[in-house]
Image (cartoon, helix red, strand yellow):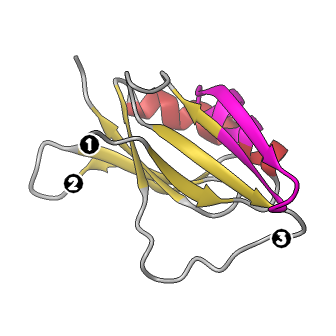
């Protein structure tokens, strides 16, 4: 078994694709339109499967927003320069909900931000 993708529903597919490609640096791997089912899928990532898992954006025709509920947590991404990345994201208008810094009592440096639909994204600094 292997991890394939994580799916989130979005209210504006093009806005979300722009966010994840232009701002978060992912590439659009493929899109699939299902007119009879009234939805479109877009797969994004830093590499395509099987090298890395992908993010699947699902746009249901005519649905502009979703309620988050309280079960969803976050998407986690690694970066080697969390402070510089957060500066660039903030300059691009991204909402940083937890400024970068150490997790209390650890050496782990992290930050949180929101995508255009309000999904939380955790950034974890990992210097390789």
Q: Nearer the viewer, residue 6 or 92?
A: 6
Q: Name which quarter of the figure residue 103 lies in.
A: bottom left
Measured in 3D between alpha carbons, the distance from the residue under mark 2 to the one under mark 1, in whole angstroms, is 6 Å
Q: Residue furthest left?
A: 105
Image quadrant holding the N terminus, namely top left
Q: Which label belongs to residue 109?
A: 1
Percent position (x, y) of residue 47? 48, 21
* Residue at which label 2 appears: 103
Q: Residues in magenta?
A: 17-42
Q: Nearer the viewer, mark 3 or mark 2?
A: 3
Q: Say above or below: 47 vs 2.
A: above
Q: Which residue is located at x 57 percent, y 61 percent?
A: 119
Image quadrant holding the C terminus, namely top left
Q: Secondary structure at mark 3?
A: loop
| Number of numbered markers | 3
* Residue at which label 3 appears: 63
Q: In terms of sequence position, does the residue under pointer 3 or pointer 2 come before the other?
A: 3
- Assess whether mark 1 and mark 2 are in contact (beta carbons under 8 angstroms): yes
């Amino acid at each position: 078994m292997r991890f394939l993708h994580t799916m989130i529903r979005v209210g504006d597919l093009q806005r979300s694709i722009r966010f994840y490609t232009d701002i978060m640096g992912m590439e659009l791997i493929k899109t699939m339109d299902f007119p009879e089912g009234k939805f479109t899928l877009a797969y994004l990532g830093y590499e395509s499967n099987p090298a890395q898992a992908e993010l699947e954006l699902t746009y249901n025709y005519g649905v502009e927003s979703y309620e988050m509920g309280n079960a969803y947590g976050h998407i986690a991404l690694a970066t080697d320069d969390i402070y510089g990345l957060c500066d660039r994201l903030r300059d691009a208008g991204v909402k940083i909900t937890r400024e970068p810094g150490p997790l209390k009592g650890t050496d782990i440096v992290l930050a949180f931000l929101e995508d255009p639909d309000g999904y939380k994204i955790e950034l974890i600094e990992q210097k390789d």
